[in-house]
Structure formats: structure tokens, C-alpha cells
Image (spheres, rainbow, N blue to C red):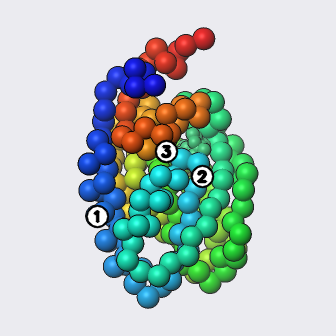
Amino acid sequence: MENDIQNVLFTEDQIRHKVEELGETISRDFEGRNPLVICVLKGAFIFMADLVKRMTIPLDIDFMAVSSYGQATKSSGVVKIIKDLDVPVEGRNVLIVEDIIDSGLTLSYLIDVLERRNACSVSIVTLFDKPARRSVDLEPEYKGFTLPDEFIVGYGLDFAEKYRNLPYIGILKPEVYTRP
Ligand code: PRP
Ligand code: MN
Ligand code: MG
């Protein structure tokens, strides 16, 4: 698995520091608002776990599973809800936790769903952002790192469901995704 990585883009330490910062900022901003923190499965599962440990305020968590990529390295644009929330969002201050925003299609769809369910507010935190690839107008309230247009894996992010368990962020060798 490690052999498939061309180079490490962000180390465990760099990620940890960024997540600590985000946790502090978000805790300040959401003080007294009892946010509903929503993890967008599967990619955000590790970031979500690390982030909420750095949030020092009362909050609720829930999970939503959506998929747009499937086995491809590019978004298909078709978003499917695979697992919906367990709790109502009406009147809640929602914080959506994403690992990466690429075209923005996944999140713009989710924001739309949550607003139609009458959330009080919907904010976004993403660990990684690829603004160059955006196809809809969408700017997250909180972001970790801005990325060049390269296919990254690790810390929850996959290629064909693999590499999510790498503790760092790596760039895949191109030969891996051109493999037959
Ligand atoms: C990836 C990533 C984001 C989304 C970003 O999820 O985790 O959720 O794509 O792309 P977009 O901005 O172009 O919509 P994916 O669909 O691969 O599912 P996964 O999280 O289960 O890997
Ligand atoms: Mn995802
Ligand atoms: Mg994926």
C-alpha cells in the first residue's frame, strides 16, 4: 500500500495541528448553539472523529452517507443518499464535516436538502479544498488546506475504497489509477 504513494503531502503532525486549530475556532463560533455535527461518510470519518475531540462545547453528532465518485477519480455529478440522518434538523445549527470539496456538487446537494428541512443554519468545515475544480459556487466557512489538482489519498480519502487507513495524506503514483 505504501508503495503506491508517490510522496507524502501532509504528515500526521501537520494534520493534527490544523485539526486542533479548526476545533478551537469552531468551538468559539458555536458556543451556546448546541450544533448538530454531521459527518459525510465515508471520506470524513477520520477527520470527524479527530475534530469533535477538539471541540470543547456541547454538541450532537450524526452521520450521512452519500456517494458521487464510485470507482472513478472524477465526480460523476450524481449524488445519492445511501444513509440518511437519524435525527430531525429543523431549527438546528448544523455543521457539515467534509474531508474534501472538489466540484462542490456533493455539498451543494446536501446543503439544499438540509435547508429544505428547515435547519436554522448550515455551515461547512472541510479539511481539504480544491477550489480550482469547483463547478458550483460554494465557499466553506472553515477549511484546513487548499490543494492543487492532484489525486490525494489517506486520512479517510480513498481511491477505489483503498488507502483510507493511511494516517497521512499522500499523492498516488499515476500508474496506480491507470492499472488495468
Ligand atoms: C468524495 C469526498 C467528498 C466528495 C467531494 O466522496 O469525500 O465527499 O467526493 O467531491 P465533490 O465536491 O466533487 O462532490 P466520494 O463520493 O468519493 O465518497 P466517499 O466519501 O465514500 O469516498
Ligand atoms: Mn465523501
Ligand atoms: Mg471516495
Label 2 close to label 1 by CB (< 8 Å): no
User: Is 97 drawn above or below residue 28 in the view shown?
Assistant: above
Whole-angstrom CA distance, mark 2 to mark 3, is 9 Å
Decide which of 18, 142 is in the foreground and name it: 18
Q: Earlier in the sequence, mark 2 or mark 1?
A: 1
Residue position for label 1 = 21
Residue at x 51%, y 52% (from the top left corner): 44
Residue position for label 2 = 41
Question: What is the residue that sits farthest to the bottom in this orientation?
Answer: 32
Q: Is mark 2 within 8 Å of ligand 1?
A: yes
Q: Give SS at disc 2.
A: strand
Q: Dividing the image into 4 quarters, which one contains the C terminus?
A: top right
Residue position for label 3 = 156
> At label 2, which amino acid type do we have?
Leu
Any part of residue 130 in sight: no
- Dividing the picture into quadrants, the one containing residue 29 is bottom left
Any part of residue 114 in sight: yes
**How many residues crowd mark 3 within 10 Å: few (<14), some (14–19), many (20+)?**
many
Q: Position of residue 34 (x, y in %)?
A: 50, 83
Residue at x 65%, y 59% (from the top left corner): 64
Q: Position of residue 131 (x, y in %)?
A: 40, 46
Whole-angstrom CA distance, mark 2 to mark 1, is 23 Å
Q: Position of residue 173 (x, y in %)?
A: 41, 20
